């Protein structure tokens, strides 16, 4: 929600930046020192990548990844497969309406399986915004793992996508689903 609704995100997932109220079970973000604003064009494109990843839509994932300069178009099959599978893995919590068990999923282990392909075969660095964004995403996933969180994630993503005002000239990604 930070990224897609406000285009503003605190990007440092340090444990000291969160306060967990054991009584209510609520976790609060308490330090905005590493906050940053994200460009609307980046947010629109990245939300399309997240939606494609959650839906295991490889053509859209790869097309948007090229448009956003995650990929050059010259990558080998090893890199393309690692990029696709990494996207699908990150999208798993949002893939179904079932609650996602972060601790039981081994998601961080499975994501790390693609690291060597990225190190050996990446032809271009990802967009600059991604470094802080992915640090935050990894931290949020690790927090969910540490807390043993089991969360209905799909409905959260659907609400964000449904209400997002895309300004990139492309059809709304839920247009086919709602037709």
Image (cartoon, rainbow, N blue to C red):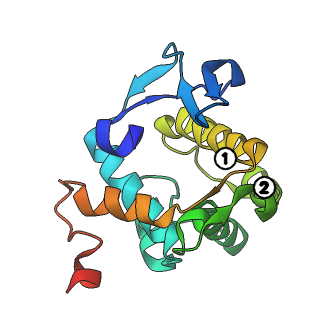
Tell me the residue that label 2 is attached to.
Answer: 103
Note whether 130 is above or below 29 in the view shown.
Answer: below
Residue 13 placement (x, y as % from top left): 64, 29
In which quadrant will I find the N terminus?
top left
Q: Quadrant of residue 6?
A: top left
Q: Residue at x 51, y 12 (%)?
A: 33
Note whether 25 is above or below 61 in the view shown.
Answer: above
Residue 64 is left or right of residue 81, and the answer is left
Tell me the residue that label 1 is attached to.
Answer: 141
In which quadrant will I find the C terminus?
bottom left
Q: Are marks 2 and 1 in contact (CB under 8 Å)?
A: no
Note whether 108 is above or below 2 in the view shown.
Answer: below
Q: Is residue 74 visible?
A: yes
Mark nearer the viewer, 2 or 1: 2
Q: Gap between marks 2 and 1, in whole Å?
A: 9 Å
Q: Residue at x 60, y 25 (%)?
A: 12
């Amino acid at each position: 929600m930070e990224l897609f609704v406000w285009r503003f995100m605190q990007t440092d997932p340090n444990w000291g930046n969160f306060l967990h109220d054991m009584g209510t079970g609520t976790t609060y973000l308490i330090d905005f020192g590493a906050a940053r604003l994200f460009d609307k064009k980046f947010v629109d494109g990245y939300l399309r990548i997240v939606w494609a990843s959650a839906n295991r839509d490889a053509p859209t994932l790869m097309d948007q990844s090229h448009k956003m300069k995650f990929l050059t178009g010259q990558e080998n099959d090893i890199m393309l497969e690692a990029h696709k599978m990494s996207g699908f893995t990150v999208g798993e919590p949002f893939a179904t309406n079932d609650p996602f068990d972060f601790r039981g999923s081994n998601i961080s282990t499975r994501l790390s399986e693609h690291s060597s392909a990225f190190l050996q075969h990446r032809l271009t660095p990802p967009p600059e915004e991604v470094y802080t964004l992915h640090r935050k995403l990894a931290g949020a996933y690790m927090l969910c793992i540490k807390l043993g969180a089991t969360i209905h994630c799909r409905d959260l993503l659907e609400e964000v996508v449904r209400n997002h005002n895309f300004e990139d000239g492309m059809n709304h990604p839920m247009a086919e689903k709602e037709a």
